[in-house]
Amino acid sequence: MARHAARKKKLSELTVKRLRPAAKPFLVWDTKQSGLALRVRPTGARSWYCVYSRHGRPRWYRIGDAKVIGLADARLLAAEAMLAVAKGGDPAADRRAARSKGTFEELATQYVDHAKKKNKSWKQADALVRRFLIPKWGKLQAASVTRSDVKSVMASIEAPVVANQTLAAASAIFSWAIKEELLKANPCRLVDRNKTTTRERVLSDSEVPQFWAAFDSAGLVAGTALKVMLLTGQRPGEVAHMRREHIVDGWWEMPGDPVPALGWPGTKNGASHRVWLPAPVQALLAELSDDQTAAGFVFAGERGGPAGKLDGAMRAICTQIGAERATPHDLRRTHGTTITGLGFGRDIMNRIQNHREGGISSVYDRHQYSSEIQHTMEAVAARIVALIEGRPEADEKVVRLR
């Protein structure tokens, strides 16, 4: 809204109606009422503004739509705003302050609409907010949440990683609110994160058959999904959302971008990915449905959506067999470790697990290494099946295959 691009004239109702929109927004300043301007957008929409100076900087106070507020009323409202300014007030700041009087729960709900467009992980963050923050802060004024409140929540969350993730989710909400001029401060700033160590959990050779047998206790759908994670090494969220439409001639072809119509969230790094489904996996998928050409989620829940609560299933399994805590992602890590353990190398592991490589070579090398990927996937699956069946001597056979 640059003032130098505006025009000045004594406005009338007829002048306001006759103003024609241009390719860019423009302003017409009223010479009768100081600070009153009419903004005309390329769409034809017209809005009244009162513009005044505060500490040497211009403030834009929106009066309202010119279709609703006539010229006489706009002049009256502008005069009232300018009188408040003369008395030391700041009408634009007062309006923002009034908007910020909402509760934290209302602010968090507003933020979700923004996050859906910007962040693929918005559901996970929102779940943490609903679980840990809304019960404590939901009815508080958003502007009244203090750093002490943040520290208190952090201390109440037992898992350090979850506490850090919750802190990040809260900070994102407050940062957005500051950008939108709804709040002036982020109480999450200067709050220390918990120190965490990188997870290195990998199922041992002796644990593989134990977990495999226990997967069945999670039910057919969830148990098969966990087995497929172990046999393919793909990300848990992507396996849970696997679609039959994306399986072509034994290859699972994952679009990098989300496909909302199919409920496909896209890959984590946004890169399209193509991985071979070894024979044991194809056999497992066949057990779930006789019609392999049918559309829909491979691991569909009771209501037809993607499989859920796989983390809970893994916790229950660990308790059941008395094993150290393991997560669905640890199954992916076990698969990757098996790849390198069999001597196939980290390069092929990165290709199979869709780790972003970067560089110009990744742009022009989309469909190479198919035979290497297929051979590696079959060899790793054979190794895992051998462990399940109590045949650890499979190591030598895999080496000879190479």
Image (cartoon, rainbow, N blue to C red):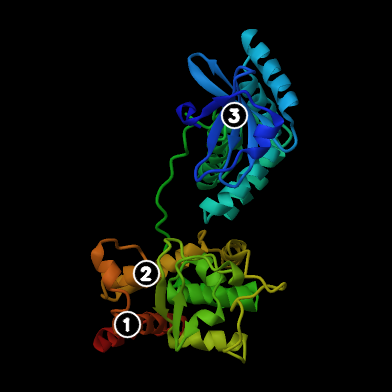
Observer-nearest of 207 and 51: 51
Secondary structure found at label 1 = helix
The amino acid type found where label 3 is placed reads Leu
Task: Locate residue 72, reporting x and y percent.
Answer: 74, 24
Q: Nearer the viewer, mark 2 or mark 3?
A: 3
In the image: residue 204, left or right of residue 326: left
Task: Locate residue 53, reporting x and y percent.
Answer: 54, 16
Residue carrying label 3: 183
Whether residue 132 is visible here, answered yes or no, is no
Label drawn at residue 370:
1
The amino acid type found where label 2 is placed reads Gly
Direction bottom: furthest residue: 290
Q: Nearer the viewer, mark 1 or mark 2?
A: 1
Name the image quarter holding residue 262. Answer: bottom right
Q: Residues within 10 Å of mark 2 (few under 14, many from 20)?
A: many
Observer-nearest of 82 and 390: 82
Residue carrying label 2: 336
Observer-nearest of 188 and 106: 106
Label 1 to label 3, Cα distance in Å? Answer: 52 Å
Secondary structure found at label 3 = loop
> Where's the C terminus, which quadrant?
bottom left
Observer-nearest of 285 and 22: 22
The amino acid type found where label 1 is placed reads Ser
In the image: residue 348, left or right of residue 333: left
Q: Is residue 304 above or below residue 105?
A: below
Q: Is residue 274 above or below residue 126?
A: below
